[in-house]
């Protein structure tokens, strides 16, 4: 059960309604999960959803790499909602089942594509070491460009916010989703 329930759309104040309508009429086609939680603070919801729209739909990195990064973040945070919501998008974008399963299981993914391997290594270093070695940074820049690296950091940051929201407010997975990530011990 979530710690903070989404607001009933019939109960939205005018500021919340404007943000709700902007999200619902956009490419997401609905207000669910962490975005519904953010409506309690409509300015946060508005700014955050705009960043998310950029990261998801307008970034310079291909959807395959963006979805790979989102799967990484979902697994890193054990954010079941994010994992369940994005797994179909990752598969559709071309991330292989084998790579997704390995990420889920905490194993080294069997990458067939160098750009995926570099994105995964970059995110792993960034999260484990809180920095990225010059050689890995330069390899990734050579592979996806400096704009791609900037956008990748943006995707990781946005999906950290998403994941934190999921974890703090105990947002459950989408209805009908089977939990796949390891359970945390208390």
Image: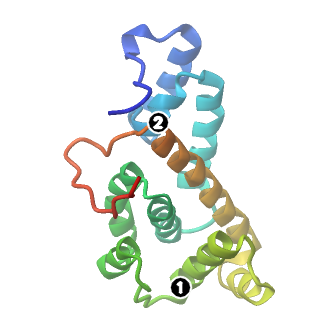
- For the question of whether residue 25 can be seen, the reply is no
Q: Nearer the viewer, residue 40 or 185?
A: 185
Q: Quadrant of residue 91?
A: bottom left
What kind of element bears circle 1?
A: helix
How far from the left and from the top, in percent, is residue 185?
A: 38, 57
Q: Earlier in the sequence, mark 2 or mark 1?
A: 1
Q: Which mark is residue 117?
A: 1
The residue closer to the viewer here, 184 or 109, is: 184
Q: Nearer the viewer, residue 71 or 90?
A: 71
Quadrant in which residue 44 is drawn: top right
Residue under pointer 2: 169
Which residue shows up at 52% across the image and 71% down it? 65
Disc on res. 166: none
Which colouring convention does the figure follow? rainbow
Q: Residues within 10 Å of mark 2 (few under 14, many from 20)?
A: some
In terms of depth relative to the viewer, which is nearer, 72 or 88?
72
- Residue in view at x 75 percent, y 74 percent: 131
Q: Residue at x 32, y 75 (%)?
A: 101
- Quadrant in which the N terminus is drawn: top left
Tag 2 secondary structure: loop
């Amino acid at each position: 059960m979530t710690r903070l329930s989404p607001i009933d759309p019939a109960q939205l104040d005018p500021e919340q309604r404007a943000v709700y309508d902007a999200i619902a009429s956009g490419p997401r086609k609905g207000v669910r999960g962490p975005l519904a939680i953010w409506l309690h603070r409509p300015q946060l919801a508005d700014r955050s959803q705009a960043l998310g729209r950029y990261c998801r739909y307008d970034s310079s990195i291909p959807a395959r790499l963006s979805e790979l990064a989102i799967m990484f973040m979902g697994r890193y945070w054990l954010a079941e909602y994010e994992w369940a919501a994005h797994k179909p998008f990752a598969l559709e974008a071309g991330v292989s089942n084998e790579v997704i399963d390995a990420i889920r299981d905490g194993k080294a993914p069997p990458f067939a594509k160098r750009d995926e391997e570099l994105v995964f290594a970059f995110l792993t270093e960034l999260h484990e070491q809180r920095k990225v070695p010059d050689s890995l940074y330069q390899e990734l820049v050579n592979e996806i460009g400096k704009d791609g690296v900037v956008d990748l950091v943006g995707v990781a940051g946005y999906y950290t916010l998403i994941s934190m929201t999921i974890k703090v407010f105990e947002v459950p997975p989408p209805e009908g989703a089977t939990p796949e990530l390891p359970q945390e011990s208390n």
